[in-house]
Image (cartoon, grey):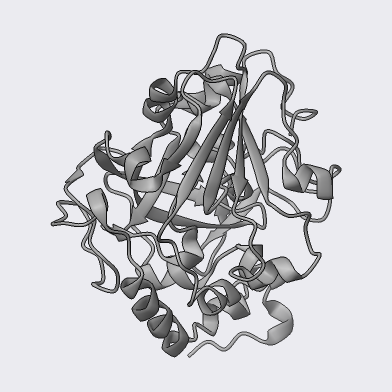
Amino acid sequence: MLITNAPDIRSSEITPQGLYLRRREFISGAAAVAAGLALTGPFTGQADAQTAGPGKLARLATIKKSGYGAGEKLNSYDDITSYNNFYEFGTDKDEPAVQSRAFTTKPWKVTVEGLVNKPGDYDLDEFIKPFALEERIYRMRCVEAWSMVIPWVGIPLADIVKRLDPTPAAKFIEFYTLKDPTRMPGQRRNVLPWPYVEGLRLDEAMHPLAILAVGLYGEVLPNQNGAPLRLVVPWKYGFKGIKSIVKIRFVDKQPRNTWQDMAPNEYGFYANVNPSVDHPRWSQKSERRLGEFRPRPTEMFNGYGDQVASLYTGLNLRSNY
């Protein structure tokens, strides 16, 4: 047996403590609570997905199979649900699974406002009902240099935007997370300005890769992963994927997102995965897939460059980070 001395191991190769300490007993409890609060209406029913869920939460209704991510090795359900960035439920990676156990997602409304022809307060079932659910297996990359492969279930954001019918003046979409410190204990601390806010250019939102996710592994979203509705834009860093969305605004000017306000020298509006632009405190040239020991090179646009690079023709991706 080859034993490597501690000084010979690079810090970048050490498994994160939060990943090692999974707290399975807490997560099982969280899943049981969330199952009791699972969505009803068009979300329930028999699933037909490429991936089988673990049977912890409610199954989603019939899911359209897609070719996105075919052949990718998925991260496990435990990986995906026990290692999360969701400051509304705590700043450590293992806290959201514990602190979100009692979070209720029924009833849930989504407010649509701004430069749009169909504004209003939509019940989530009503908001989602006209659309078929799709499974999309996406590589996801966090700005902190770790990544996963996740089998999301959701709806193309473009389909929802078309239904809401923005006016010609609309150029951007702004998203808001729920603000409720009684239900989201992390919001009782001033670690960020609440509520969490994110935004996309309208053409980014209309790209076929962008989805609003309502589930993963064929089941409803666990609370710690952004239940009941979250944004997924796989060519951008994970902080763009705003969770527990309660409001969508169509606007004519580029909105400022939460991390841009919090640390503008570190986080910009675009957040496109770009290995040539380092974070001020660490390199973005490599990443570690959860479950793997060795880091791998980071790909431009997280490997989705063939699909999305044309969105940024002529844009300086160093100054527009």
Quarter-of-image position of residue 127: top left
Closest to the observer: 40 or 148?
Answer: 40
Establish if 125 lies above or below 270: below
Report the side of 225 relative to 193 (left or right).
left
Closest to the observer: 261 or 106?
Answer: 106
Q: Which residue lies furthest to the front in this view?
A: 120
Please provide percent x and percent y for residue 148: 47, 57
Please provide percent x and percent y for residue 287: 59, 55
Numbered circles on residues, count: 0
Establish if 305 lies above or below 147: above
Q: Which residue lies furthest to the top in this view?
A: 168
Residue at the image point whose x is 16% and y is 56% from the top: 45
Please provide percent x and percent y for residue 271: 66, 39
- The reply to whether residue 90 is visible in this rendering is no
Q: Where does the C terminus fall, quadrant-wise? A: top right
Quarter-of-image position of residue 146: bottom right
Closest to the observer: 132 or 209?
Answer: 132
Quarter-of-image position of residue 301: top right
Report the side of 205 relative to 93 (left or right).
left
Residue at the image point whose x is 74% and y is 70% from the top: 188
Residue at the image point whose x is 39% and y is 63% from the top: 75
- The reply to whether residue 301 is visible in this rendering is yes
Residue at the image point whose x is 35% and y is 44% from the top: 154
Establish if 60 lies above or below 265: below
Please provide percent x and percent y for residue 283: 74, 51
Report the side of 275 relative to 78 (left or right).
right
